[in-house]
Image: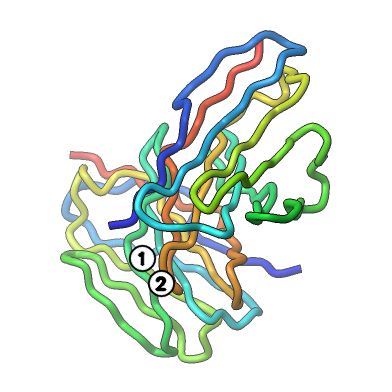
Amino acid sequence: TQLLEQSPQFLSIQEGENLTVYCNSSSVFSSLQWYRQEPGEGPVLLVTVVTGGEVKKLKRLTFQFGDARKDSSLHITAAQPGDTGLYLCAGSTGGFKTIFGAGTRLFVKA
Amino acid sequence: GAVVSQHPSWVICKSGTSVKIECRSLDFQATTMFWYRQFPKQSLMLMATSNEGSKATYEQGVEKDKFLINHASLTLSTLTVTSAHPEDSSFYICSAPDTIYGYTFGSGTRLTVV
């Protein structure tokens, strides 16, 4: 059974702090996606990483794909209340099937 | 960009009735669509893969006779929850692959069975 372990599951921080979310698996992924989901809405794609060791930046968000393509991290610098939401990582092993991590619920306090 | 339209956004139904949820790809064709279920404060659980022109593929533990999936065209997949019960109340989301690397999600349907 393929598993994608995501941690932490919940994070409450003050505005301005930095944070990192991790996704780990024993499986090798052809690509890995990070999504953000607001309550009552579907997930919205933030980024897709494909190459081992790849680093992508999206404003204050930095995404990294592990060299072996088994893990990934999302780092947020100087978090803001608008960053509050559920962050999901999802890995694809080929074809269309994707497995999701359990999600990280982030709450940024003003 | 790619858009997936899901309707209805929310629905309340009585126990024993059936509810149909539609998922449409608006500006691209999707031979495959996915249906997920999400419980409060939890991640997405894949229920089934909808295939245009063939039967859907259900994940282990998902009752295919209860959750009927029809992929009628290259832009439309429907999920029908038959004989709904309160335990079927949940947030249902569809998605379609729009590129090799990404998936576009619908906005979700919140089903409440009373």
User: Quick check: can you spot residue A105?
Assistant: no
Disc 2 crowd rating (10 Å Cα; few below 14, some 14-19, many 20+) is many
Q: Read off the chain for label 1.
A: A
Q: Which residue is mark 2?
A: A73
Counting every numbered tag in the picture gives: 2
Instruction: Using the rendered image of the protein, determine whether residue A96 is visible from the camera's viewpoint.
Output: yes
Tell me if B84 is positioned left or right of B99 in this view.
right
Position of the C terminus of chain A by quadrant: top left
Closer-to-camera residue (A103/B18): B18
Q: Nearer the viewer, residue B39 or A75?
A: B39
Q: Quadrant of residue B107?
A: top left
Which quadrant is the N terminus of chain A positioned in? Answer: bottom right
Chain at tag 2: A
Which of B103 and A70 lies nearest the eye of the viewer? B103
Q: Amino acid at mark 2?
A: Ser
- Mark 1 lies on residue: A20
